[in-house]
Image: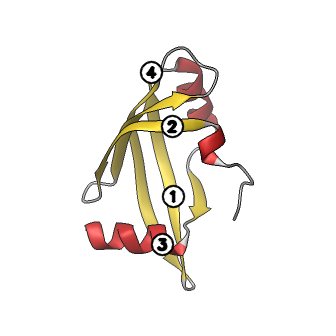
Amino acid sequence: MSTGIDPKKVATVLEMKLDPTHGILSGTLELKGEKDPLVVEELRYRIVPSEGISRIEILTLKTNREWINSLGECVLPKTLDLPAVAAKALSMLK
């Protein structure tokens, strides 16, 4: 599933940490037009194989922005298709 959003036009990744064993991602993003960076304190996920397509299920999200945390509570969990290269990279990290 394509969102039609080019991530490079929205943000620059300043730092990223991935713990594939526990399904946790954290990092810092510089958002276009924002003064302060977005700190993703904890994004919990799991990889869901399905009919030859790998999907990622975003379970929870905690950031330094209260409104993003509240939005996450409303829309998560959410499952997205993973590009083949991302699925392969994640599977190699386990």
Q: Position of residue 68 (x, y in %)?
A: 57, 27
Sequence order check, earlier mark of 3 and 4: 4
The C terminus lies in quadrant: bottom left
Sequence order check, earlier mark of 2 and 3: 2
- Mark 3 or 1, which is nearer the eye? 3
Q: Amino acid at mark 3?
A: Val
Separation (CA) of disc 2 from disc 3: 20 Å
Q: Amino acid at mark 4?
A: Asn
Separation (CA) of disc 3 from disc 1: 17 Å
Tag 1 secondary structure: strand
Separation (CA) of disc 2 from disc 4: 17 Å
Separation (CA) of disc 1 from disc 4: 21 Å
- Mark 3 or 4, which is nearer the eye? 3
Q: Around disc 1, counting alpha carbons within 10 Å, would you say few (fewer than 14), some (14 to 19), or many (20 or more)?
A: some
Q: Position of residue 85 (x, y in %)?
A: 48, 72
Marking on residue 30: none
Q: Around disc 3, counting alpha carbons within 10 Å, would you say few (fewer than 14), some (14 to 19), or many (20 or more)?
A: few
| In the image, farthest residue toward the right | 4
Q: Amino acid at mark 1?
A: Glu
Marking on residue 64: 4
Q: Is residue 48 left or right of residue 41?
A: right
Pointer 3: what residue? 85
The N terminus lies in quadrant: bottom right
Pointer 1: what residue? 57
Inspect this view and state whether residue 48 appears.
no
- Mark 2 or 4, which is nearer the eye? 2
Q: Around disc 2, counting alpha carbons within 10 Å, would you say few (fewer than 14), some (14 to 19), or many (20 or more)?
A: some
Sequence order check, earlier mark of 2 and 1: 2
Viewer-side residue, 25 vs 11: 11
